[in-house]
Amino acid sequence: MTPSLASYIAGTLQIAVVVGAVWYGSWWLRRWIVPEFSGALARLAELTIAFALIILSLELIGSVGLLKEVWITVACVVIPLIGAGLAWKFAPRDVEEIAAPAVPTWAFLVAVAVASWCVAEWAFPTQLSLDQGMFGGDTTWYHMPAAARFIQDSSIIPLHFTDALRLAVWFYPQNSELMHGALMGVMGSDWLSPVFNMLPLGIALLACWCVGRPYGVGPATLVAGAMLLSAGVMIETQPGEGRNDIVCFAFLIAFVAFLINGHQRRAPSSGAVDEKPDPNAPLLDKGPLILAGIAAGIAISIKVSMLAPVGVIFLGMILISGKGRRVTTALCLGISMFIVGGYWYVRAMLYTGGNPVPAVGWGPLHLPQPDQMPLDPRPRFSVAHYITDPSIYRWWFFPRLDDAFGVLFPLILVMLAAAALWLVFKSRNKIVRVISAAALITAFVYVFTPLTAAGQEFQPRGFFTNTRYLLPGLLLAAVMLPLIRQLREPQARAKKTLIFLTVVYAITVLTSPKWYPSFLPGAIFLTLAIVWAPVGLSWMKDNTRVPKYVIVGCVAAIAIIGAIWGRGEEVGYADKHYTRTTLFLQEGGPQDAFEFTRNLKDKRIALAGSGEIFFGQYGFYGVDRSNHVQYIGQEGDNGTYRLITNCREFINTINEGDYDYLITSEYTQDAPEADYWFPVRAWVDGDPNAELVVSEDDITPQPDYVYKINGKLDPDRCAKLDQAAIRQVRTDALQAIKDREAEAAAAEAAAESSDSQ
């Protein structure tokens, strides 16, 4: 299974060529769109354009069935070069770049230290995933299965139905998964996926700096943002995983940074923002608006939850633009946002006949959407459901907020809410007011969003992980906080603000995960590549007479070290990942089935049954991700995918799919009294062409089984499984549950009796 050195070298060279072409294209396009941007802001603009170029290239070839290794490389080279050619022709020359206000050296070093610590924190779980694989629930449920299916099908047009739940995750925006799939296609495996989120983390930190850059408080906005990027819920869910929150957060902050910095043209000598601009001047020029639209488009193409903050800011920018400029603002922001971020929404409209977000209900609009069964990962309660229940605060919300944001979570939440409110009513900068209002509205929407307090009633076990949906509002408020005039003027007060935020950050990261000594070299290298090298080389370029070839040589040396290190990681990943199957589903679910399928290659695997089967389905794709894995269900109109409710249709679907294996639990739901409880295993068990090869009878909540399909299954057997037989199966299941409960109660009573004696 060890990948060949030749394939690694070929993949690495392809990535190097793509990076070179994308950098060249993004540099020229930035010179065309915002030629006045300089320094960190220019680099943020180039990274944003680079992501947009890659996304558009992959969407293009994925739409015509060419998402394959060669075409991925060709598209990601040719399209950026075409962009560079156009920009070279039309980019203005002799435009004066606007320098940022000077930042005290000590403040700059504080920002570098905080960014370094944040990256190092993320580096440890990232390397852990490189050793053992990605086990996050959403990662194995739908993020990485979608990425694998894209590269297997060479297309992004078909819907990949991962389950029969209400959520319809196949309609989520999937550009993050598309990039993961492209990396699989180029490298021949998914070993780069655990490292992927480190890049948007670096972009997010850079964007935080750029928000405060025109005010001279870049270090403070970086530290404020890092306070949340280093929060427990981020460290727990993002590094080393296929989850995509950090990607959209990075470009949400970049969106804000470009709007804030669009004022720079007002004071070319100092770069300072003028909060009392000429009333006859436009609020923003076209270039910053276009670039902001590109960043917003990337954010909404990653996660549908970005529609709330991006939509509020978009509408707010139109309203504050003034007469004669509103159409220009709407077009510059809207067109660039749609080009970069509209693909998945248009795709959804084509499947549903007009609904761009079919995974979300539209109330009185009654737009067409999938007719899903009311099945949820957990009961879909919102935070608002418990808003007046103090016991839930005491036993669930407060402890989980501590886990999510650290021991100072009351201070952080109150401070950020107060900052956003203050800026909405007191700031003289209209853009700052709009962004602060978006922070408050996004937080308000979070309170009423289903699943934010998911779990059995009075047991909101999903609250911790879904505090991620609160983070967009908190991040917007955090990077706005240091912009409050009373906290940044005079300079002595700005110094105290930075020190205060740094202390809060330091206390917050005391809950950091364990730092393993064996991962220190990798953490140092990743910190070097993401923080130290970009910062140090930029400083050398701007403040010394070091020849360019020295800087180029340093970049090349880091790339070569990364390539050498990467080969070792690729080989180790192939040998070790997903060997510890007990890590799937928090040490539950079909462990023997995961182990059995790990070394299968190019097999067609059908899944059926309860959540223990489909939540960890990425584990069934095999060590080289070549297995075709599909949950068995019934397709319907508007992208509907439902459980099959009868034996004959279930058997016919398996036969039509020409599957090699079936992995199933006993029933489609764990509780026999559930509304959509079907004995899927009974429909297959006993067929002469269904060979039982794995049986896990003693696991909870359900046993699971792997059948090898040796030929067509017989649908006529279903006649013997009449309704009376099905009712008997349900009765037997209920009796088995009662027997287990009685045995447990008897054992507990015996233990208590023994203790009393």
Image (cartoon, helix red, strand yellow):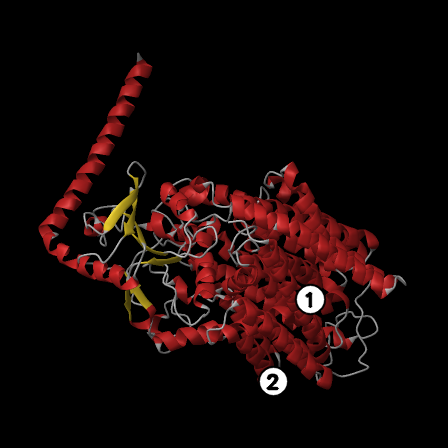
Res 375 quadrant in image: bottom left
The answer to whether residue 683 of the structure is visible from this angle is yes
* Quarter that holds the C terminus: top left
**Numbered marks: total:** 2
The foreground one among 104 and 535 is 535
Residue at (65% x, 37% y) in the render: 517
- Tell me the amino acid under the disc marked 2: Thr
Q: Which mark is residue 44?
A: 1
Front label number (1 vs 2): 1
**Is residue 267 left or right of 327 when viewed as pictured?**
right
The foreground one among 598 and 511 is 598
Going by the picture, which residue comes out furthest to the top?
Answer: 757
Q: Residues within 10 Å of mark 1 (few under 14, many from 20)?
A: many
Residue 518 location (% of width, % of height): 64, 38
The answer to whether residue 126 of the structure is visible from this angle is no
Spatial distance from mark 1 to mark 2, Cα to Cα?
24 Å
Residue 740 location (% of width, % of height): 24, 33
First-in-chain label (1 vs 2): 1
- Tell me the amino acid under the disc marked 1: Leu
**Is residue 502 left or right of 697 when viewed as pictured?**
right
Task: Give the SS element for disc 2.
Answer: helix
Residue at (80% x, 65% y) in the render: 101
Residue 384 location (% of width, % of height): 41, 55
Residue at (24% x, 50% y) in the render: 690
Residue 170 location (% of width, % of height): 40, 64
The foreground one among 292 and 723 is 723
Res 585 quadrant in image: top left
Q: Which mark is residue 144?
A: none
Residue at (69% x, 78% y) in the render: 84
Q: Residues within 10 Å of mark 2 (few under 14, many from 20)?
A: some
Q: Which mark is residue 328?
A: 2
Answer above or below: position of 489 versus 684: below
